Image: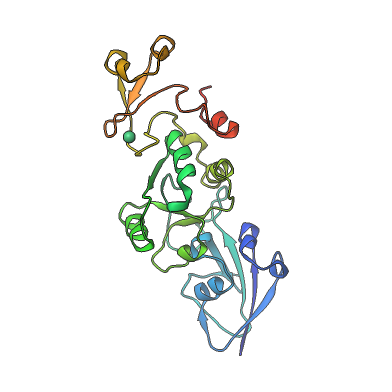
Amino acid sequence: MHRIRLRFYEELNDFLAAERRGREFVRSIPRPTSVKDLIEACGVPHTEVDLILVNGRSQDFSYLVRDGDRASVYPVFESLDITDVTQLPDRPLRSTRFLADVHLGKLVRYLRLAGIDTAYEQDAGDVHLIERMLQEERTLLTRDRRLLMRRAVTKGYLVRSDRPPKQFNEVLRRFDLRRWIRPYSRCAHCNTPLQRVPKGSVRSRLEPLTDRHFEVFSQCPECKRVYWAGSHLQRLDPTVREVLSPG
Ligand SMILES: [Zn+2]
């Protein structure tokens, strides 16, 4: 048997059984295996990992762990530049293009209202999601840990919270998105960038009195929905509204 000592850091502990969090533990395996497989066998999707030190040296996912190895596994760092030490595939630390799985409809709406490019298909299967993720170089947002463990998934994030307003803040924080927020630049319904339009051209589509209080209007060239500062905010959770409100 090969006995490997493992320790996971920071939010990677979210994925571990309680008795393994924040401390070193031992896994026994019959033969040397890739450190990636060992990490996933502990419940941690590889997409969450940005740095692996084995016996103090940075290794990539293919490294074969063997008896006596000691592995330290770190999450994606958002505020610390570790490009000098990491052996994992070069990838930007921050991502601003997303693809959400079917269970995240409300989060998708919030991100789009904030102007964040977020693709979404209501009835897409896993294979289709992964294909689109790769083709369009998007980061996959999901609540499904198994999906992130699929080999083909290169960029993904497991959304921890189950409440959409919290999910919204979680994703903004995790990907450091606040400086990319551009309210009313993208259609909440279909993700298409909005275009400025003269008030006269959309007056027939507005609710009564709206045209008296606002001057700047945008329209989705795809689905023709009309937006203005303050539109689509009324029924939103206050924490989301605060992020999206001008000023
Ligand atoms: Zn639209």
Q: Is residue 108 left or right of residue 10?
A: left
Q: Residue at x 49, y 43 (%)?
A: 107
- Farthest top residue? 212
Q: Position of residue 14 (x, y in %)?
A: 63, 60
Q: Residue at x 32, y 36 (%)?
A: 192
Q: Is residue 198 left or right of residue 53?
A: left
Front residue of 237/135: it is 237
- Farthest front residue? 208
Front residue of 169/1: it is 169
Q: Quadrant of ligand 1?
A: top left
Q: Is residue 85 visible?
A: no
Q: Position of residue 67 (x, y in %)?
A: 61, 85
116 over 7 or under it: above or below: above
Q: Is residue 188 left or right of residue 85?
A: left
Q: Position of residue 81 (x, y in %)?
A: 54, 51
94 over 205 or under it: above or below: below
Q: Residue at x 54, y 63 (%)?
A: 51
Q: Is residue 25 visible?
A: yes
Q: Position of residue 10 (x, y in %)?
A: 65, 58
The N terminus lies in which quarter of the figure? bottom right
218 over 29 or under it: above or below: above
- Which quadrant of the figure has residue 113? top left
The coloring applied to the image is rainbow
228 over 117 or under it: above or below: above
Give the number of marks.
Answer: 0
Q: Residue at x 41, y 48 (%)?
A: 98
